[in-house]
Image (cartoon, rainbow, N blue to C red):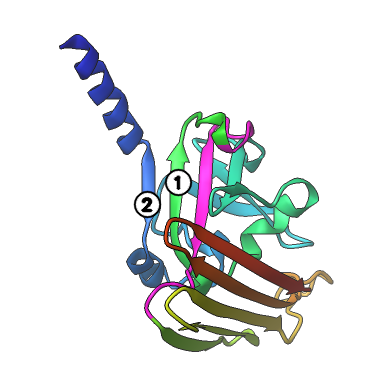
Amino acid sequence: SSAASDVYKRQRAGILNQDMISTAELSRAACCNLGESFTTNPSVDVSYSDAATGAKQIKLLGLSGTYVQMLAENIPNYRGVASPYALGYIPGPWMQSIQVSKGASSVKNGYESITGQINVEFKKPQTTESVSANLFANSLAKIEANFDGNIHLNQRVSTALLAHYENNLMAHDSNDDGFMDFPRVEQYNFQNRWAYMGAVSYTHLTLPTKLE
């Protein structure tokens, strides 16, 4: 029938307008934070909006990040003065996946999504128990350390600890113009997550901490 055909077309359009960046793709991109995780996705462009402070701007469908709604597990996040720096607040190893919706989205999660939504899913405490850590250093004296692990306390309660540290140890001015080539940043991020799996319900608690 024509009604069923219309429903199919709307569902197909919704599928075509949404991209999923999975854990495998995040590993292939070797990203250090959310802003660097879109290198393998042509739909999203990330560039510096302020070279002095390191603020980055995201573009979706050619429009600036002002019209893109940022979500953390389907909850609106990183609004206002935090938005220029939000792309550096989420370390790459913390992310389980990223969903990018292009075009005007539902107002269920807010009204800001004029050009689209970007939703970040963090690693969950209730997944299979695991521990991972990695270290990064480059020739420009930038170092990073990441740790994440989870444990099941019993059949219903589980917890996870996510930690991140980064530091630019030296200032760089390769063209000797008196201005640093990029800002020096020292950042500590911690997140403790708890999950309770009830018989008919699911409760989740997140305790984030950030120092910069």
- Tag 1, which secondary structure? strand
Residue closest to the eye, 91 or 167: 91
Residue at the location (27% across, 31% down)? 12
Residue receiving disc 2: 20
Residue at the location (66% across, 65% down)? 89
Magenta stretch holds residue 125: yes
Dividing the image into 4 quarters, which one contains the N terminus?
top left
Residue at the location (58% across, 78% down)? 162
Task: Indicate whether 173 appears above or below 40.
Answer: below
Task: Indicate whether 149 appears above or below 110.
Answer: below
Q: Residue furthest top?
A: 2
Residue receiving disc 1: 100
Q: How far apart are the two marked residues, 2 and 1, measured between alpha carbons?
A: 6 Å
> Horizontal and vertical percent for residue 100?
45, 46
Question: Magenta segment range?
Answer: 109-128
Q: Earlier in the sequence, mark 2 or mark 1?
A: 2
Residue closest to the eye, 4 or 14: 4
Q: Is residue 1 left or right of residue 132?
A: left
Task: Indicate whether 120 appears above or below 107.
Answer: below
> Horizontal and vertical percent for residue 123?
48, 69
The reply to whether dot 2 and dot 1 touch (C-beta < 8 Å) is yes
> Horizontal and vertical percent for residue 200?
43, 56
Query: Can you tell which mark lies on residue 191?
Result: none
Majority secondary structure in the magenta region: loop
- Name which residue type carries label 2: Met
Magenta stretch holds residue 118: yes
